[in-house]
Amino acid sequence: MPRTIAIGDVHGCADEFEELLEALELDPLDRVIQLGDLVNRGPDSHRCVELAREYKVESILGNHELRLLTARHKDKPSLLKDYDLLTVQQLTPSDWAYLQSMPKFIYDAQIDTVLVHGGFLPGKPWQTQEVELITSIQVIDKKGKPGKRSENPDAAPWADSWHGSPFVVYGHTPRPNVLERPGSIGIDTGCVYGGHLTAYILEDKSLVQVRARTAYAHSKRLPDPV
């Protein structure tokens, strides 16, 4: 039976990405969807895009790709962060074309499941929410507005208030373990910070993980790798 497989934030961790793709023992009929932030922070964004093309992985637009593309299209290098500059140096024209092709979400009507990078604001039609919101939302503040976890450390995850439908599979917010809720699952387990790269198989709700080979970046919110 063909599988639909979601993969969390890769962030330039090419060795771990390749190890996970091999561990999945993919069938040609399997559909693999990477949840955005394929590039940046880790050591080899170019190779990550190469692997995505080689394995016919579909990638969703993440906030990191959105920033890179916005800076490129608007010719505003001031939008870029320091680690963006290394990525820009690595990416080839074919890599940029791959980033440009990323959709803002993928919806499977047969199983009423949507795959997205960040998430959605509960209580609003999910299909029409702005790309800036759905690639960046992490928490909901006391006023009911979307926010970043770093700016609202006491605010609850948006997923706590999301009860579907549809069921949401997302990344973006790194945690030591996946975050399961009745209406969603978050599978960014902080590979670039020394955690794991996680794949979630939609049909049987199983997980496949590989451990990061090292911590390529530091997170104030994740424990040091063991």
Image: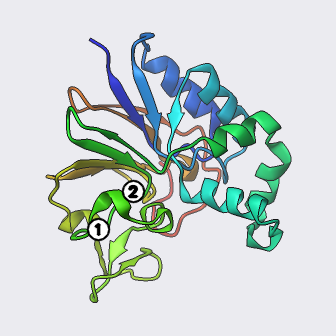
Residue nearer the viewer, 199 or 102: 102
Secondary structure beneath dot 1 equals helix
Which quarter of the rendering shows the N terminus? top left
Q: Nearer the viewer, mark 2 or mark 1?
A: 1
Q: Residue at x 41, y 68 (%)?
A: 137
Residue 77 percent location from the top left of the image = 82, 68
Q: Residue at x 54, y 64 (%)?
A: 219
Residue 226's disc is none
Residue 158's disc is 1
Residue nearer the viewer, 175 or 72: 72
Vertical comparison of 189 with 20: above or below: below
Vertical comparison of 224 with 194: above or below: below
Residue 99 percent location from the top left of the image = 65, 44
Q: Residue at x 28, y 49 (%)?
A: 168
Q: Which amino acid does the dot numbered 1 rest on? A: Trp
In this rendering, position of residue 115 left or right of residue 65 = left
- The way the protein has been coloured in the rendering is rainbow
Q: Residue at x 25, y 42 (%)?
A: 113
Sequence order check: which comes first, mark 2 or mark 1?
1
The residue under label 2 is 175
Residue 72 percent location from the top left of the image = 77, 59
Q: Which amino acid does the dot numbered 2 rest on? A: Arg
Vertical comparison of 125 with 89: above or below: below
In space, the residues marked 2 and 1 are separated at their CA atoms by: 14 Å
Residue 12 visible in the shown view: no
